[in-house]
Image (cartoon, rainbow, N blue to C red):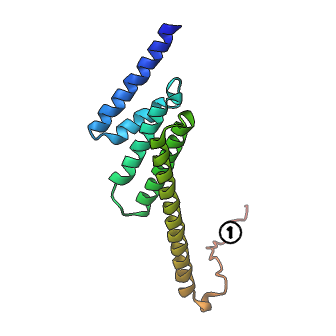
Amino acid sequence: MLSLVLFLLQQEYILQEIILQLADAGRFQEALDELDLYLPSFPYQDNPVLHFYAGLLSLRLVYSGENGSQHDVDVKVNLLRVAQKHLSKSLVIDPENVVTATFLEETSKQLTSANKSDTQSTADAASDGDMDVDMHRDNNDARPHTKRVRRTPNATQHR
């Protein structure tokens, strides 16, 4: 039994080392992908350090991308949610970790701010779209258009 526990602990430490090496090499997405692969399974799911690493890697990816399109904003908001989820899980497992609590608090603030600005930009885009539709409506086109059908003589008659 003791040898099994030691074996499982070694696996967790090996994964932690792999994640640190990938992050040190600047391969943040690959490190997060490795964690996403292992974190749902035993014994990794109950390791607060691995969840903390996943949260930090998600935050790192939020700030490594370029600002720009709405797609980029959506990806960043999603990464903030992922970071919040992992940091929350880490704090549930290790409630005494003040560093994790601080990162979680800051991540929650950033996510709230990002959601507010995203909601505002969506509302602005929707109102702009409504104005475009109303501005281009032609009152002379109020009547419905009839569909034109080509008719051939004797096409439907049987001989």
Residue drawn at (53%, 34%), measured in percent from left and top? 94
Say which residue appears at 42% left-offset and 20% top-offset.
11
Q: Position of residue 111 (x, y in %)?
A: 50, 56
- Quickly name the residue at label 1: 154
Q: Is residue 97 left or right of residue 22?
A: right
Q: Is residue 36 left or right of residue 159?
A: left
Which of the pair 111/73 is nearer the observer? 111
Q: Residue furthest bottom?
A: 140
* Residue type, numbered disc 1: Asn
Residue 90 versus residue 120 in the image, above or below: above
Q: Nearer the viewer, residue 142 or 64?
A: 64
Q: Residues within 10 Å of mark 1 (few under 14, many from 20)?
A: few
Quadrant holding the C terminus: bottom right
Q: Nearer the viewer, residue 24 or 139?
A: 24
Residue ID at (53%, 31%):
40
User: Of 4 and 41, which appears nearest the observer?
Assistant: 4
Image quadrant of residue 137?
bottom right
